[in-house]
Image (cartoon, rainbow, N blue to C red):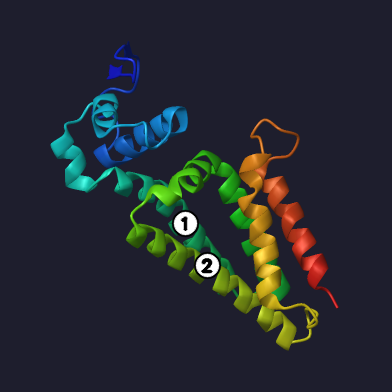
């Protein structure tokens, strides 16, 4: 049984049913979503996860580290999948389409994590904020490099600055949390395909 924020016990997975770090992250994600990062205490997290503070601090040095990891784990998946698609031997327009569709689909699949993080990112230690921004910048730069590759080869139009195209596209991606619903008309994969189609169409000569 896990103890909720109001002190009541609730049915949940048996202690030990999943590794401690994953259990802590799942609980932290739920509590941050329900009551906000600032209003959630470390004690509430460890009580709900069925572990001690010592066990938590073995894996995470602070509540900040939990918030950081909620988003960082999504970003690591996106970066690995992006590199796989970007380094394939497919034509550049196909590689860019695959990357664009995937970042939308994976963001939609992990929407709670990304919404929670961006809502509370300003509360992180400045060093953590800088680390996240650097990781996101590397991702954006890889996408920009694909656009520039297509422009050099004549596949994409050259009259649009690659930096602006990247900012325009990721601005739309980061806006997903305000309107996308998992029970909506389109799945995350379908939205990803349409976003990618629009990106490629905007770059055609």
Q: Earlier in the sequence, mark 1 or mark 2?
A: 1
Label 1, secondary structure: give it: helix
- Furthest residue in direction left, as rendered: 54
Task: Estimate the x, y position of residue 66 in percent, counting from the top left.
Answer: 33, 44
SS of the residue at dot 2?
A: helix
Please indicate, yes or no, whether residue 52 appears anywhere in the rendered image.
yes
Q: For the point 65% across and 46% down, which residue is it? A: 176
Circle 1 is placed at which residue position? 75
Across and down, in percent, residue 62 comes to 25, 45
Give how far across and how far down residue 135 sits, in percent.
45, 65
Which of these two is toward me, 23 or 126? 126
Look at the numbered discs 1 and 2 and tell me whether their residues touch, using CB distance below 8 Å: yes
Q: Residue furthest right?
A: 205
Left or right placement of residue 140 versus residue 8 in this view: right
Relative to 52, residue 1 above or below: above
Reply above or below: 140 against 46.
below
For label 2, the residue is 139
């Amino acid at each position: 049984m896990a103890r909720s924020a109001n002190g009541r016990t609730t049915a949940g997975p048996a202690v030990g049913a999943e590794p401690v770090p994953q259990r802590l992250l799942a609980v932290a994600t739920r509590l941050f979503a329900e009551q906000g990062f600032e209003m959630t205490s470390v004690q509430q997290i460890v009580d709900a996860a069925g572990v001690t503070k010592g066990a938590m601090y073995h894996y995470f040095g602070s509540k900040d580290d939990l918030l950081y990891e909620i988003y960082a784990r999504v970003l690591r998946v996106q970066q690995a999948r992006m590199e796989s698609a970007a380094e394939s031997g497919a034509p550049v327009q196909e590689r860019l389409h695959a990357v664009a569709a995937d970042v939308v689909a994976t963001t939609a699949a992990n929407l709670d994590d990304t919404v929670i993080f961006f809502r509370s990112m300003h509360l992180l230690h400045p060093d953590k904020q800088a680390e996240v921004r650097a990781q996101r910048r590397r991702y954006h730069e890889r996408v920009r490099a694909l656009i520039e590759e297509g422009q050099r080869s004549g596949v994409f139009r050259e009259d649009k600055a690659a930096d602006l195209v990247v900012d325009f596209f990721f601005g739309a991606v980061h806006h997903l949390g305000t309107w996308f619903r998992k029970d909506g008309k389109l799945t995350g994969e379908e939205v990803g395909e349409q976003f990618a189609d629009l990106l490629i169409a905007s770059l055609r000569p």
